[in-house]
Amino acid sequence: MGFKDFFKLTSDEQYGMPADHLEGMAGYKYDDYFGVRIKRNEGYIRLEDSEKQQIILPFTQIVQVNFITWEKTIVKALNPLTEGIVGGLIGGDAMAVVSAIDAKGRTRSEKVKVEGALEIRYHPKGDFRTTKTMVFRSHLTKNDTMKWAQTLSKYANLPVPQYIHPEKKGSTYL
């Protein structure tokens, strides 16, 4: 199967969606790459990471597909090399060394907001009382992502994908 066949976006036979993992998959970090592929005849979706490891999710375990606004605060480690370079530009050689040493073991927080993230709700294998969630940021256009989600919903006999907007945060009055 060729590259063009993976992304077949022109018809009902739409299969592949390149995406970044946002949350919900144990062992994977924020922004890890995935190819998410609908295997209609086999009755599952296949998630394949950048190292070609595959995860199979049968249609029978999928509960709902939604589009959500995903918001999280991501904590990242500071890079001593980068901090040393910046410190060196500002304060010379001594500041470069101090900045690099100071950055080791420190972190920075970054707020991330993804509009239209794809949420797949599913039951873990053998446990139909529990519902878990996987969230992805699609590399496709908004329209093509919607078509992909509608195709998945059709083949898995699910309701039409919903747009779920976060509730406004503000004062609560009693």
Image (cartoon, helix red, strand yellow):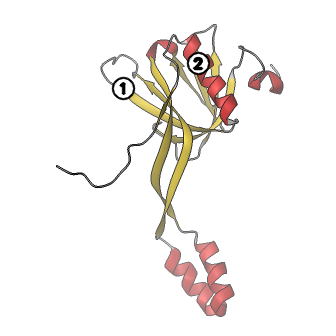
Q: Which residue is mark 1?
A: 131
Mark closer to the chain start, 1 or 2: 1
Residue nearer the viewer, 45 or 64: 64
Give the quarter of the figure containing the N terminus: top right
Instruction: Give the image location of residue 115, x and y in percent.
Output: 55, 44
From this viewpoint, which residue is outermost toward the left? 174
Q: Amino acid at mark 1?
A: Thr
Asked if residue 166 lies left or right of residue 170, the reply is right
Name the image quarter holding residue 83. Answer: bottom right
Instruction: Give the image location of residue 120, x and y in percent.
Output: 49, 28
* 1 or 2: mark nearer the eye: 2
Asked if residue 157 lies left or right of residue 139, the reply is left
Discs 1, 2 touching: Cβ within 8 Å: no
Badge 1 element: loop
Vertical side of 114 occupied by 7: above or below? above
Residue nearer the viewer, 15 or 147: 147
- Separation (CA) of disc 1 from disc 2: 18 Å
Q: Which residue is mark 2?
A: 152
Vertical side of 98 occupied by 104: above or below? above
Q: Residues within 10 Å of mark 1 (few under 14, many from 20)?
A: some
Q: Residues within 10 Å of mark 2 (few under 14, many from 20)?
A: many
Which residue is at a point 81% across and 27% down the rendered structure image? 3
Which residue is at a point 35% across and 51% down the rendered structure image? 169
Vertical side of 28 occupied by 145: above or below? above
Badge 2 element: helix
Instruction: Give the image location of residue 163, x and y in percent.
Output: 50, 32
Which residue is at a point 45% across and 39% down the rendered structure image? 165
Instruction: Give the image location of residue 170, x and y in percent.
Output: 32, 54
Q: Amino acid at mark 2?
A: Leu
